[in-house]
Image (cartoon, helix red, strand yellow):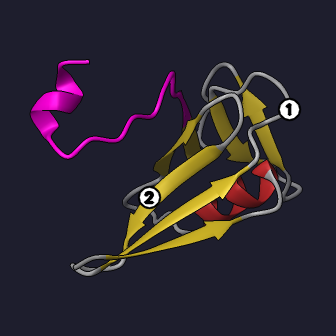
Amino acid sequence: MVMVSSIELESFEDMILMLHSRMTPVNMTSSLMCTDRICFTIISAGDEQVFIISSPPPSGRCRFAYVDDYGKAKCSETPPTGKPIVFVISVKNINETDSIIKALQK
């Protein structure tokens, strides 16, 4: 059985800073899924532990998020050059089902 832990962050900026802190020189990108009400990412901590980390969505349009030279989270519609980035993916809907086949037929 998999243990699922939910962590709710206070702000979108906290989410970007957290994802940025997990990046490495080999993997300088991350992704974040957002609806109009919530942003979330899923992180595996092994075979039996999953963390769902959520935050409020950004206040404006945001396709790419990054941390600027002053340590502030910023958003843009184009990827910044030479900076680690978080891809912000727009999610239309979230459904739950007990079958992959059922999920794909919707």
The answer to whether residue 83 is magenta is no
Q: Earlier in the sequence, mark 2 or mark 1?
A: 2
Q: Position of residue 103 (x, y in %)?
A: 22, 30
Q: CA distance from mark 2 to mark 1?
A: 22 Å
- Give the answer, above or below, for where 77 lies relative to 20: above
Local crowd size for mark 1, using a 10 Å CA cut-off: few (<14), some (14–19), many (≥20): few
Q: Position of residue 69 (x, y in %)?
A: 82, 52
Tell me which amino acid carries mark 2.
Ile
Region of the chain picked out in magenta, as a range: 88-106
Q: Position of residue 89 (x, y in %)?
A: 52, 30
Query: Along the line of sight, which residue is nearer the eye, 105 or 10?
Result: 105
Label 2 secondary element = strand
The residue where tag 1 is placed is 59
Quarter of the picture containing the N terminus is bottom left
State the residue at coordinates (53%, 68%): 22
77 over 18 or under it: above or below: above
* Residue at figure coordinates x 70%, y 27% from the top left: 62
Whole-percent x, y for residue 104 in the image? 19, 25
Callout 2: 10 Å neighbours few (<14), some, many (20+)? some
Identify which residue, 106 or 50, lies in the foreground: 106
